Image (cartoon, rainbow, N blue to C red):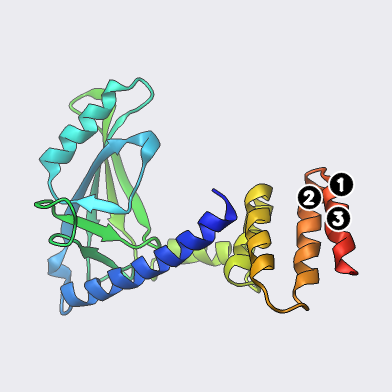
Amino acid sequence: MDGHIITHLGFFIGDLHRQIEQLHQKQYAGITADDTFTLYRGQGLSTADFEQMIKDREVFSTFAESNQASPDLCGILFVMKVNPSQSTAPFASIAGINQFQGEEEVLFSMNSVFRIQDIKQMGGNNRLYEIDLILTADNDPELSKFTDYIRQESFPDSEGWYRLGMVLIKMGQFDKAEDIYQVLLNQTKDDEDKPHFYHLLGSINKDQGKYQDALTFYEKITC
């Protein structure tokens, strides 16, 4: 995915997050611990996608079983326990506004984290499993320790797309980082910021052995 798509997708995700927050506030106002509910998601392991969850276990057990047709997939039924009174990640039912009428879908924001509680075979089938999950909250001690570590390791003094680019460089995703910094360079209207982006782009190319391209960017710093 190139930098243009990443940056445009970021605006979409931000807008979607705000809409989920608004729906969550309307749907779960005044809830208590007694309002805990269960959601189900059936799929193949290699295409895991936790964003969209659905409440009908029988339908998604069947969907999980259908993934066994491919030798490269295991059928997975995710069973998720959600306590709205404890969760700090927004989620909302999109029944009625979803294009698939009649389906009770629940959409979770991207900052949702689930803890695995149990993994077990279904019906003695070694290619069909049930995975029990529970939605965590920000005050979860282990999650807090992990997220604090991630923040410290992901350039906490930087922000936004610049920070994402630094993380991608650390991960060795040089092409994606270069795409992002090229977009930021093209978008900046401050001439004082451009030398910094030229230096970053030069360093990225140098680390990939593209010395001529790196030299081209470095030369622009002094222009």
Q: Is residue 2 above or below residue 187?
A: above
Disc on the earlier residue, 3 or 2: 2
Which mark is on residue 216?
3
Q: Is residue 152 visible?
A: no
Q: Is residue 58 visible?
A: yes
Q: Residue at 9% of width from left, 52% of height from top? A: 102
Q: Nearer the viewer, mark 3 or mark 2?
A: 3
Residue highlighted by disc 1: 211
Q: How many marks?
A: 3
Name the amino acid type tagged 2. Asn
Give the Cα distance between marks 3 and 2.
10 Å
Real-space Cα separation, disc 1 to disc 2, in angstroms: 7 Å
How many other residues sit within 10 Å of disc 3, few (<14), some (14-19) or many (≥20)? Answer: some
Disc nearest the viewer among 1 and 3 = 3
Residue at x-position 64% and y-position 55% = 179
User: In the rendering, at what x and y percent does residue 182 appear?
Assistant: 68, 60
Q: Residues within 10 Å of mark 2 (few under 14, many from 20)?
A: many
Q: Is residue 60 left or right of residue 208?
A: left
Dots 1 and 3: beta carbons under 8 Å? no
Look at the image and tell me in which quarter the C terminus lies: bottom right
Asked if marks 1 and 2 touch (Cβ < 8 Å), the reply is: yes
**Which kind of residue does numbered mark 1 sit on?**
Tyr
- Which mark, by number, is residue 76? none
Question: Upstream in the sequence, badge 1 or badge 2?
Answer: 2
Q: Amino acid at mark 3?
A: Thr
64 or 141, which lies in front?
64
Q: Residues within 10 Å of mark 1 (few under 14, many from 20)?
A: some
Query: Which residue is identified by label 2?
Result: 205
Left or right: 18 as drawn, with respect to 55: right
